Image (spheres, rainbow, N blue to C red):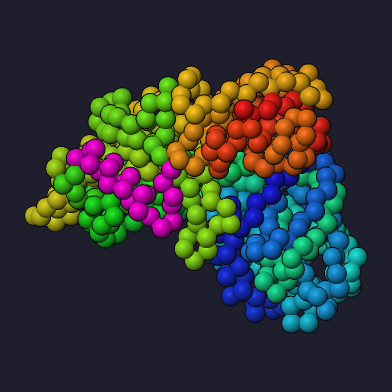
Amino acid sequence: MVRRRTRGWLAWCGVLVAVLLALSPLLGVGGVASAQSADAADFLDEAENQASDLDPLVDGEDLTLVQEEGDTFTVTFLDGVEEVSDFYLTFTVEAPRDGDTDPFDFGVFFRDLSDTYVSLIFQSDDDGGPGYLVVNEEDRIDTGELDEDLFPIEEGSTYEIELAAIGDEAAFSVNGEPIALLDISSNPDPGAISFASGIFVDNQIDGDEVQVTDITFTSLDDGGSGGGSDNGDATDDQETTDDQETADDEDTSTDGEVAVSETYGFSVTYDPDVWDLRNYDATGDDFDTIGMRNVDLFDFINGTSNIVMFAGETRDDMEECVARDIEYFQNSDRYDFVSIAEDRNNDPLEGETSSGDGYYTVVWLEDKGPADDEFDEPADLTVYIECRPIVDGESMLLIEHYAFDKAYNDEISARNDLLDGIDMSGAGSAVDNEEPDGADTPTPDADEEETPEADQEETPESDNGGADGEIVVTIEPGSDDVEGEAVLTPSGSSRTRVDVTTDGAPEGALVVLQEGSCDDLAGESAFDVGEIDENGEATGRVRITPDDLDGNYALTIVDADTEDYEEPLACGDIG
């Protein structure tokens, strides 16, 4: 019912804590709630009426928020709630301790895309009394005091929370009392719903548990849709929008918004329902690590993928440009370079694009996080790299597409659509587009780049007949009539690619590696491979070599509802 992420997956947690700490003196300003409560009541009534005619995505579920040692704070997402903008949500929280002597907090994040979100946070003790705070990724939206009769802070006290968002507004109530109507127009994009506790540093206690019960969530988007597949590893990069140089009159023949490079004159037409342009910046800066000067930068996100485009002056050709970017990742303090990715035939994913206008490769990385807030566990990333000349011998467009391993293949189509929107017809040198004379740097070349062919891009995926170090595992029925086969193949020098094909395994079942053997399982996951898809298949990479797995581990298919690791649906000994 939930998936958990801690600091290792959410680089923004540390940033958020810093924002909250900076804003915490603003709590307790008072007066806001009473002034807005009447409007909030009407808003919540309307949302409840809309929800009453729809089936909830989550109905009466419970979860426990656990603060783990070393985490900035722990965030738990609701499964089945992926891309929702408008919704009606109710839940109950129990005070974990006496908030007067041992302060606590809890919050709900919505329209949550990791880098952008709105969060409603309740705090038991702000300068002597309880209060609430509403922020997005950058700013305080609202704050106020809560009467202790309404929000008692003794251990075991309960808080029935009602929260709704529709369009540019949201509202919430506590124990039946409408509190505030909120302007959330800065965060229009649909996203996940997540819960957190221990958000303020002073409220973090290792092992602390906060009970959230009777969670009912109804999407008000498009008649109640808004569920989706669990994209568990949402990306390391995700969004914000609206600080962009667009030219809507630039390409009237193509639906979408148009971003134009000031320096190089090319344009990128993109679908705003799919992509947010987080940043366009004619920096004029030099990026020595990728060998470019006078750079224009575009940064697109869609909640799962991040695509960055660098346009700059360079004497490199296409292959040299790609090689220089690979060298950047190999020398980076943030990333551990694993290897060039491979296709199903174990051939490296690299070469000319199908249009012949660019050169590409795909690499596997481990993202350790920023230097000032490294992740507890590195995140497995796949990065597509492509270089296209803007003006041969003068300027180049470098494209980087980042996604978590498990999400990457599903994102290829969206990337191709975005790159098809690059129009070089107005491109030229930097000087041509800025001053009467001058000199250099045009922009990303234009045309539709059918990046690499689909079959090439199966990155973290499958097969490998006969490759050195390959292990084939026969999966036999356990507690259910499930069988199949898994192929384990070396991935770089430190990891294993696992490709699983089953017959009879339910969609969503967990594929995990356990220490021991099928006759003597450890009863817990040592490595999570992924989930069985609608075709009975799963693919993932794990941070251990096939040699280390051989004879020491078993591959198990586990029921996602019971998570019974001791009695899996099916099992196969490795080696």
Per the rendered image, the range of residues in magenta is 317-338
Q: Say whether residue 318 is magenta.
A: yes
**In the picture provided, is 293 more to the left or to the right than 197?**
left
Whether residue 517 appears in this view of the structure is: yes
Q: As drawn, which residue projects farthest toward the left?
A: 437
Asked if the stretch drawn in magenta spans residue 202, the answer is no
> Most extreme residue toward the bottom, as rendered?
127
Name the residue at 34% across, 42% down: 399
Relative to residue 41, is residue 303 drawn left or right?
left
Above or below for 86 versus 569: below
Q: Which of 414 and 69 is in front in this view?
A: 69
Q: Nearer the viewer, residue 117 or 372?
A: 372
Q: Determine the main secondary structure of the stretch shown in magenta.
A: helix
Residue 123 located left or right of residue 461: right
Residue 50: image x %, image y %? Answer: 77, 42
Q: In which quarter of the image is the C terminus?
A: top right
203 w.r.t. 395: above or below: below
Residue 423 in the image: x percent, y percent? 29, 36
Name the image quarter holding the N terminus.
top right
Q: Position of residue 109 (x, y in %)?
A: 67, 55
> Residue at position x 68%, y 55% from top?
75
